[in-house]
Amino acid sequence: MRNILALIQRFYVFLLFLALQVLALIILFQSNNFHRSEFVEHSSDWVGSIYGRRDQFSRYLRLGDINDQLALENALLRSLLPENTGKVDTAVFDTNDTLTFVCYEYRNARVINATVNRERNYLTLDRGRLGGVEREMGVIANGSLVGIVSSVSDHYAVVMPVLHSKFQGSVKMKGSGDFGLLVWGGGDPLIADVKEIPKHVQVSLGDTVLTTGYSSHFPSDLMVGYVESLDDKPEENFHRIRIKLSTDFRKLNYVQVVSNILKAEQDSLEQQVQDPENALNRP
């Protein structure tokens, strides 16, 4: 208390000036409409600015929760797209009907570790078997191709991305629909190769490359990339196409794991074609 009194005694002239100044301003604003309206207008701006900065700071602190919520909503919205459903046409006597069913489900996950500068790169996801993730499921991000789940534990999953020497994916040219094989030759994490597109197919720089939907991992028409360059050889029958990938693996944070509900049925049927002798012996 003694220190407070000593401080007031030391600065009493300045404190008295402040008190008189505040009193003068109060009298001015109460007795003059113009000054009062100007004060209210500017004080509202100041208060609004303070509230705005506080809101920006609060939103910054909640960015993690917001990103998680957006990833979940993206997964739910993607499951509603037309390419994720199938139709069965049935005819019973004179009655025709169409049954619609969901083919793909999506689960959001966060990338917690990744490499891009190796021959065999990988991604680690924070979601595993207990979160509904299994081996051979596809992985996408923002509607673009990422890779395939290669191994799973209870809480984590490892993904073989496009940036892997053993990755191969079925892709097609958006304009013509001709399909080829997507491979990564190493080096640049933004560039991959498309092989087995015949030379009679017209390919131009900037053409879009999409998934075919032939495999049981991904739906059709997912973005893969854009034609970056052509390096055709006269003696070869196929284009040498280099594409710029639509997925930037260096900035990948959130992905969706794709579950093909009919994958087991498709794989089983295709296995019978590849191994017909054993298929005939199955019950």
Image (cartoon, rainbow, N blue to C red):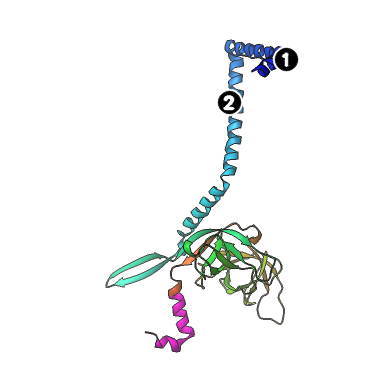
Q: Residues within 10 Å of mark 2 (few under 14, many from 20)?
A: few
Rendered location of residue 264, percent (x, y): 44, 74
Q: Which label belongs to residue 157?
A: none
Rendered location of residue 53, percent (x, y): 61, 35
To which residue does mark 2 refer?
Answer: 44
Task: Specify which label sits upstream in the sequence, 1 or 2.
Answer: 1
Q: Is residue 279 visible?
A: yes
Residue depicted at x 40% and y 88%: 281
Q: Going by the image, does 212 lie left or right of 261? A: right
Disc 2 residue type?
A: Ser
Query: Given the current orientation, which residue lies at the most extreme front position?
Result: 2
Query: Given the current orientation, which residue lies at the most extreme bottom position?
Result: 277
Residue depicted at x 62% and y 12%: 23
Q: Going by the image, does 245 lie left or right of 74? A: right
Rendered location of residue 82, percent (x, y): 46, 62
230 versus 57 height, above or below: below
The answer to which of 35 and 110 lies nearer the viewer is 110
Residue depicted at x 44% and y 87%: 278
Query: For the residues carrying marks 1 and 2, which lies nearer the camera in this image?
Result: 1
**In terms of image quadrants, where is residue 162?**
bottom right
Task: For marks 1 and 2, give the CA distance.
Answer: 36 Å
To which residue does mark 1 refer?
Answer: 10
273 versus 86 height, above or below: below
The answer to which of 154 and 73 lies nearer the viewer is 154
- Tag 2, which secondary structure? helix
Q: Is residue 14 located in the magenta-colored stretch of the structure?
A: no
The answer to which of 188 and 176 lies nearer the viewer is 188
